[in-house]
Amino acid sequence: MTRVLLIPLIAAEFALDDLGAGLLSTALFTTYLATTLLTTGLAERLGPKRMVGAGLAVSAVGTALFAASPSYGLALAAKAIQGSGSALAFVAAARYLAGLYG
């Protein structure tokens, strides 16, 4: 619900239409999907705890970039970085939990 409330504010900040505002979410989820598909076995090789930490760090960098982005292009790139970091953390956390209970 919070995200829906923020979209008009972000759209006004960057003078975006509905398509431009929607592309921010699309950038996040597209890179989330791509990163999930490309890094599924990475937690096995590097260890899930290390991957969760790396994913959270990447996601935090994306969040900070998005918060400080002066342009729409940088905001779009920041959302893509957030998507990659979130995917790394989620895949590794799922692998960690599977190791505990699986």
Image (cartoon, grey):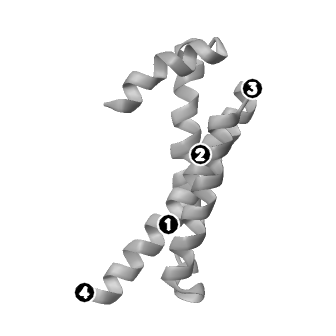
- Residue 90, how many percent across, how many down? 44, 65
Q: Secondary structure at mark 1?
A: helix
- Residue type at the position of mark 1: Ala
- Residue type at the position of mark 4: Tyr
**Upstream in the sequence, badge 2 or badge 3?**
2
**Does 67 appear above or below 31?**
above
User: Extreme left residue here?
Assistant: 101
**Upstream in the sequence, badge 1 or badge 4?**
1
Q: Residues within 10 Å of mark 2 (few under 14, many from 20)?
A: some
Q: Residue at x 65, y 53 (%)?
A: 61
Q: Which mark is residue 71?
A: 3
Name the residue carrying label 2. Answer: 63
- Residue 57, how many percent across, how many down? 60, 63
Tell me, yes or no, if residue 72 can be seen here: yes
Q: CA distance from mark 2 to mark 3?
A: 14 Å
Q: Residues within 10 Å of mark 3 (few under 14, many from 20)?
A: few
- Residue 82, how many percent across, how many down? 58, 49
**Upstream in the sequence, badge 3 or badge 4?**
3
Name the residue carrying label 1. Answer: 89
Q: Residues within 10 Å of mark 4 (few under 14, many from 20)?
A: few
**Upstream in the sequence, badge 1 or badge 3?**
3
> Circles 2 and 4: CB distance less than 8 Å?
no
- Residue type at the position of mark 2: Thr
Q: Secondary structure at mark 2?
A: helix
Name the residue carrying label 4. Answer: 101
- Residue type at the position of mark 3: Ser
**Does 86 appear above or below 22?**
below
